[in-house]
Image: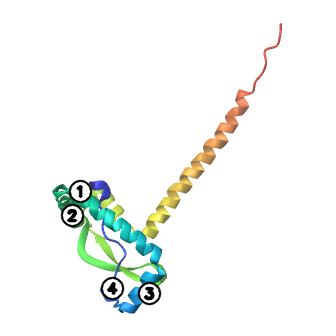
Amino acid sequence: MDDILFLKLNERQDEEKDTILTNDVRENIKRWNKADVLLFEYFNKSFWDKIENEGENFYKELATFRARKSEIKRACVTNETHLQTVYAAKRVKGYSIRSDLPKGLKTLCNKFTISENAYLAYLRGKHNERLEKDVDEDKESWDLSKDLVYEPVQPV
């Protein structure tokens, strides 16, 4: 279950959340996005059908998941949130990691709270390291191929 835990990131500030849309605007959005609406309705129905088929066990597992998520949040972050700037100078809520964490838990908590831009930079760095390693290995294998030149046996 720990492999699907998460903390909500990039949550907008409260004053930006309460956008009130008129019924006309809502209907226009649905009309403009008709294909998306149809896909959503289909998969939303199939999702709830699957949950219904799971029975009571689903809700027990969900309660366990939510408890574990709360436990991780309490262990990782302080009660204070801070605002961080993301795309187009938009400010979103971020977390402050506890300073007294043991190394293993701190690593886990950092993974939960890293911004998507920072994580993307991390992934790009790992990818570039791997590419450089592959290039070095390729160079080495080509250099080794000089040692493997076929020299036919000379008849005596």
The amino acid pointed to by label 1 is Asn
Image point 25% across, 77% down: which residue?
80
Q: Label 3 crowding class (10 Å Cα cut-off): few <14, some 14-19, many 20+?
A: few
Residue to which mark 3 is pinned: 28
- Is label 4 or label 3 in front? 3
Say whether residue 31 is visible.
Answer: yes
Classify residue 108 by image quadrant: bottom left
Disc with the residue nearer the chain's start (2 vs 3): 3
Q: Secondary structure at mark 2?
A: helix
The reply to whether callout 4 and callout 3 are in contact (CB within 8 Å) is no
Q: Nearer the viewer, residue 21 or 95?
A: 21
The amino acid pointed to by label 4 is Lys
Disc with the residue nearer the chain's start (1 vs 4): 4
Disc with the residue nearer the chain's start (4 vs 3): 4
- Which image quarter holds the N terminus? bottom left
Residue to which mark 1 is pinned: 53
Q: Label 4 crowding class (10 Å Cα cut-off): few <14, some 14-19, many 20+?
A: few
